[in-house]
Image (cartoon, rainbow, N blue to C red):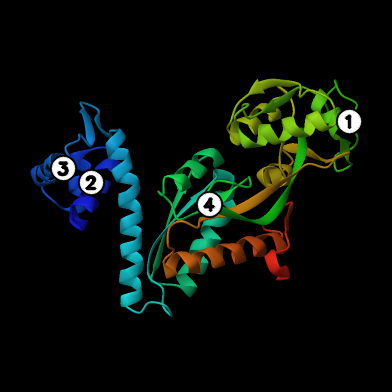
Amino acid sequence: MDIRQLRYFLAIAEQGSFSRAAAQLHVAQPALSLHVRNMETDLKVQLLHRSPKGVVPTEAGAILLRNARIILDQLAVAEEEIRGHESDPAGEVRLGLPGTVSEVLSVPLITATHQRYPKIKIRIAEAMSGFVLEWMREARIDLAILYRDVNDHGIETVRLLEEELCFLGQAVDADEPDLPPPGEALAFAQAARLPLILPGPSHGLRELLARQALTVDIKLNTVIDIDSYGNIKELVRDGFGYSILPANAIAREVQAGELRRWPIASPAVRRAVHLAYSVERPMTNAVTAIQALACEVLRDLARTGRWAGAQACPLPGGNDDA
């Protein structure tokens, strides 16, 4: 095997298609097929399972895919060092974000990157936090923002922010609960007993609320499970129930008078935001630069109030500039 074959195999596996990989690589499709057949002959195993819907790695192919990513990442580090990019980092950085973080972070981070590191290209992928973590494990991204700490071997996290979660209801007064005026604190136990529209049980926010409910020995009164924040807010607006969501996710609707919100107390509910990175794979100068810049931008968003309800956490070593 050589580096070119590894690049070709990686493109085919990630695209799930010989034709899409050929278009991405600007290589004829028969040539790609020949390279894969040669690799399979040399290794004496089948690397890809072919079907009318595309191709997926076999078990042996998955092993090769994981190692190919590591090898190509290390090669990129060597090339960057040889070309002397230490003072002027260049290249592509792959960043995974939950959708709610992407809404507030993507544009400021891309803007700051263009201003400070014009030779770096950021590639942002959005998904739920659990999927983003899987991308980190599979080396499909270089950095990730997660709503949880990670104890995985090879991945470390830095706690950057904590954001406030709020109880929300429709803009008009409802007849059912005896709620305090909007803006006044609502006990978590009372909020949990009201009919709630929440993300499904596998969602990180739902898991956090379920753990919080256990601490006060109650059960969440969930009447509708739906993962989309947009759909949750629409259902609350229409009077199907209440919800508990991050303050930043409902700030626009509260300001427009479409929803009412209450801070939660006894206990307050906050969610931590972490930046994750690999300690097994070497980081290029570009990844290192964006790691530091993402921390800076996130903390600035909290400090200036552009991330509503967020507070910066002290950095390791006591370097807290927020």
Disc 3: which residue: 36
Q: Earlier in the sequence, mark 3 or mark 2?
A: 2
Q: Are marks 3 and 1 in contact (CB under 8 Å)?
A: no
Disc 2: which residue: 9
> Given the image, on which type of amino acid does mark 2 rest?
Phe
Tell me if mark 1 has few (under 14), some (14-19) or many (20+) residues whose alpha carbon lies within 10 angstroms of its own: some
Mark pair 4, 2: CA separation: 25 Å
Q: Are marks 3 and 2 in contact (CB under 8 Å)?
A: yes
Q: Nearer the viewer, mark 2 or mark 1?
A: 2
Q: Nearer the viewer, mark 3 or mark 1?
A: 3
Q: Is 57 situated left or right of 204 in this image?
A: left
Task: Decide which of 130, 149 is in the foreground and name it.
Answer: 149
The image shows residue 139 at horizontal and vertical percentages of: 41, 49
Disc 4: which residue: 155
Q: Residue at x 85, y 20 (%)?
A: 176
Q: Earlier in the sequence, mark 3 or mark 1?
A: 3
The image shows residue 271 at horizontal and vertical percentages of: 71, 45
Q: Residue at x 69, y 49 (%)?
A: 272
Task: Decide which of 256, 289 is in the foreground and name it.
Answer: 289
Q: Residue at x 69, y 55 (%)?
A: 161
Mark pair 4, 1: CA separation: 44 Å
Q: Quadrant of residue 230?
A: top right
Which of the image's four quarters has the C terminus? bottom right
Residue 243 seen in the figure: no
Q: Earlier in the sequence, mark 4 or mark 1?
A: 4
